[in-house]
Amino acid sequence: MLGWPGPEYRSPAHHAEECEQARKWLEPPHVVDGVLVYVDDVDAHCDRARVVGATILSEPRDELFGRIYKAADLEGHRWMFIQVPG
């Protein structure tokens, strides 16, 4: 479920502004706690994400399990988008 967490919520990006350890967690481009989303066209999705301000953590690339890229949204949440081989 994605929703409004309440007034005390601090996004990952905001938390990193105030906390050295949180900054370190966000340094590597790895997504260890993100959401995996299946999409029909990874390359087109990545292009749209970039246009609207997402930070692309890894460009689309082919893996054994499909074509994938990783991004962080405007609040610093990390996402993985995958297109299964077809």
Image: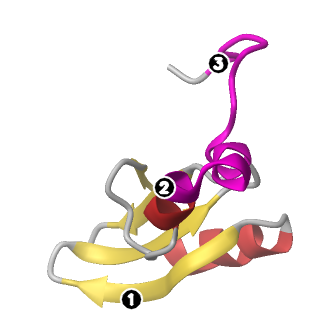
Of labels 2 and 1, the one closer to you: 2
Badge 3 or badge 2: first in the primary sequence: 3
Q: How many marks?
A: 3
- Few, some or many residues within 10 Å of mark 2 (<14, 14–19, 20+): few
Residue 35, percent across and down?
42, 46
Residue underneath mark 3: 3
Decide if residue 69 is on the left or right side of residue 76: left
Which residue is depicted at the point 47% across and 84% down?
A: 60
- Few, some or many residues within 10 Å of mark 3 (<14, 14–19, 20+): few
Residue underneath mark 2: 21
Q: CA distance from mark 3 to mark 2?
A: 26 Å
The answer to the question of whether label 3 and label 2 lie on touching residues, with beta carbons closer than 8 A, is no
Q: Residue furthest left?
A: 64
Q: Which mark identifies residue 72?
A: none
Q: Residue furthest right?
A: 52
Q: Is residue 42 above or below residue 77?
A: below
- Image: magenta residue range: 3-22
Of labels 3 and 2, the one closer to you: 2
Decide if residue 17 is on the left or right side of residue 22: right
The amino acid at mark 2 is Gln
Which residue is depicted at the point 35% across and 78% down?
A: 67
Quadrant where the C terminus is found in the figure: bottom left
The answer to which quarter of the image holds residue 14 is top right
Reply yes or no: does residue 46 show up in magenta.
no
Q: Which mark identifies residue 61?
A: 1
Under circle 1, the secondary element is strand
